[in-house]
Image (spheres, rainbow, N blue to C red):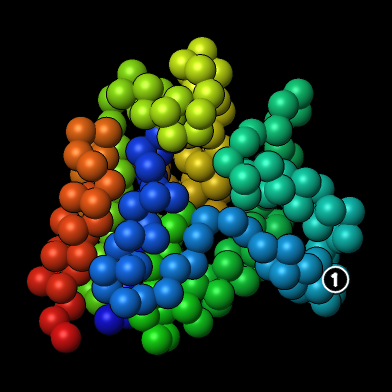
Amino acid sequence: MPGVTISSSYGTGGSIVAPLVAERLGLPLLDRAISAGVAAQLRVSLAEAEDAQFKRSRADRFLSVLAPLAIGVLSTGSTPDAAVLGDAAAPFREQAEAIMQDALAAGAVILGRAGAAAFVGRPDVLRVRLFGSKKARVEQAARLQGVDVPTAEKRRPEVDEARAQYVRRLYDVDIDDPALYDLQIDSTRLPPETCADLVASAYRALVPA
């Protein structure tokens, strides 16, 4: 203990594998959604930081960028202001990490949230990446989401880039960097249950009871 972080590219079934891992390890799950509570905390933090030259308008603009990333879809038609991201990323990262730290205090499985980058130096956290070929991920996403393949093909680059940008903006690292992970699994070739078993076994080997 304290737990596992799971990073998943589009179509790899992270939302299925993560709950199975949590069930096998008897740990609570913190999913990838950024809650309204986090957004509210960010607004407060930035408002309190006005002496450090933060402006409310910047907070609003940063939240408008984070909102689509939180649900895994890129906003379209605009490019985030680098200055805004630089100003606002640090306090948001602190808030996000505080929530993950609280969850890990008693043990947890964390899906998304840039957990691998946040805890890259923690020996008691198993950092997992679920991956697969583009074609296999699109086909699996179509099955899991109940959509046709063209729809899944359209979503794949949007979601992959959204998740990559979230990690890059907060930690300035590449989400696909193998150095971020202890274990990588092609979850398009293995059933979710098998993936969960592998993660649970690896966690138990890394962090003995």
User: Helix or strand or loop: what does disc 1 sit on?
Assistant: helix
Residue holding disc 1: 47
Q: Which amino acid type corresponds to the residue marked 1 in the rendered image?
A: Ala
Q: How many marks?
A: 1
Closer to us: 87 or 191: 191
Instruction: Find residue 103 and report its horizontal and vertical position in percent.
Output: 47, 78
Residue found at the very far top of the displayed protein: 150
Picture residue at 55% right of the left edge, 75% below the top: 99
Please say whether residue 119 is visible from this viewpoint: no
Quarter of the N terminus within the rendering: bottom left
- Figure check: 80 above or below 107: above
Picture residue at 28% right of the left edge, 47% below the top: 192
Closer to us: 187 or 59: 187
Closer to us: 152 or 144: 144
Please say whether residue 76 is visible from this viewpoint: yes
Instruction: Find residue 183 and report its horizontal and vertical position in percent.
Output: 20, 53
- Direction from residue 92 to residue 204 in the image, left or right: left
Quarter of the C terminus within the rendering: bottom left
Closer to us: 139 or 123: 139
Picture residue at 34% right of the left edge, 68% below the top: 22
Instruction: Find residue 200 and report its horizontal and vertical position in percent.
Output: 20, 65
Picture residue at 88% right of the left edge, 60% below the top: 56
- Figure check: 43 above or below 10: below
Quadrant of res 206: bottom left
- Figure check: 118 above or below 103: above
Q: Mark 1 Cα within 10 Å, few/some/many (few <14, many 20+)?
A: some
Instruction: Find residue 142 and report its horizontal and vertical position in percent.
Output: 45, 25
Quadrant of res 77: top right
- Direction from residue 111 to residue 162 in the image, left or right: right
